[in-house]
Amino acid sequence: MEALFAILAGLLIAAGVFLLLSRTIIRVVLGLAFLNYGGNLVILTVAGLRDAAPPLLTLKGPYADPLPQALILTAIVIGFATTALLLTVALRAYQVAGVTDVKAFGDNLNRDPEHPDGLPANPEHPGPDRPDPALESRRVVVAATGPSGGGKS
C-alpha cells in the first residue's frame, strides 16, 4: 500500500511542477495546490500506513502516532488559505493586466493606461481603486456650487 501511495504522491508532485512551469496564472495556482496535496500524501506515507490504536491510554498498544495527522490537518488549512489568496491575487492581476499570461504581466502592470505613450506608471499616481483626493475635493465643490460653477444669478 505504501508503494501505491508513494507513486500517487510522485504523480501529484510531478503534475504540480508541470503546472507550475506553465505561463497561465490559473495553472500556476493549481500547480501549487497539487504540490501541497502531494506533500500531504508524502507525510502520510512516511508516517506509515498501519492499523494501530488511537493514542488513548485506556486502549492496548501499539499506538498510532498523532503527529503526522496533526501536521497534515494544519497543512490542509494553510494550503486552502494560500490557494484562496493566490486565486484572489490572480483575479486582480487579470483585472489589471487583461491577460492571464504570466510573462505579459511585467509589461502590462508597469504601464500607465491613461498615458498616450504607455510610459511606466508613477508610483505616486493613485490606482483605479484609490481616487485622487484633489479630484474628490473638486467634485465636492462642483456639487455644492452647481453645474454652472457660479453662484445664484
Image (spheres, helix red, strand yellow):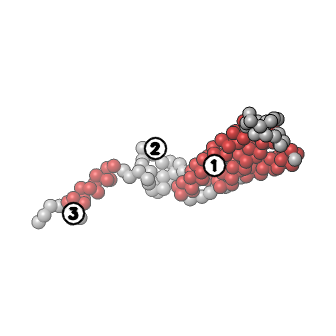
Write down the residue under mark 1.
80
Q: Is residue 148 left or right of residue 68?
A: left
Vertical order, 142 against 32 (above or below): below
Residue located at (28% from left, 52% from top): 137
Dot 2: within a 10 Å radius of its alpha carbon, few (fewer than 14), some, or many (20 or more) residues?
Answer: few
Q: Based on the displayed image, in which of its 4 quarters is residue 2 positioned?
A: top right
- Which percent across, then down, holds residue 82? 61, 46
- SS of the residue at dot 2? loop
Q: Based on the displayed image, in which of its 4 quarters is residue 124 positioned?
A: top left
Q: Is residue 115 visible?
A: yes
Q: Which residue is nearer to you in this view: 12 or 22?
A: 12
**Label 2 sits on what residue type?**
Pro
**Label 3 sits on what residue type?**
Gly
Which is closer to the viewer, label 3 or label 2? 3
Q: Quadrant of the C terminus?
A: bottom left
Residue located at (56% from left, 52% from top): 88
Write down the residue under mark 3.
146
Cα distance in 3D space between marks 3 and 1: 52 Å
- SS of the residue at dot 3? loop
- Which percent across, then down, holds residue 131? 38, 52
- Which percent across, then down, holds residue 61? 81, 35
Q: Which residue is nearer to you in this view: 82 or 103?
A: 82
Write down the residue under mark 2.
123
Which is closer to the viewer, label 3 or label 1? 1
Work out whether mark 3 precedes mark 1 in sequence or the reverse, and give the earlier one: 1
Residue located at (21% from left, 58% from top): 144
Cα distance in 3D space between marks 3 and 2: 34 Å
Vertical order, 78 against 151 (above or below): above
**Label 1 sits on what residue type?**
Phe
Work out whether mark 1 precedes mark 2 in sequence or the reverse, and give the earlier one: 1
Q: Is residue 10 left or right of residue 70?
A: right
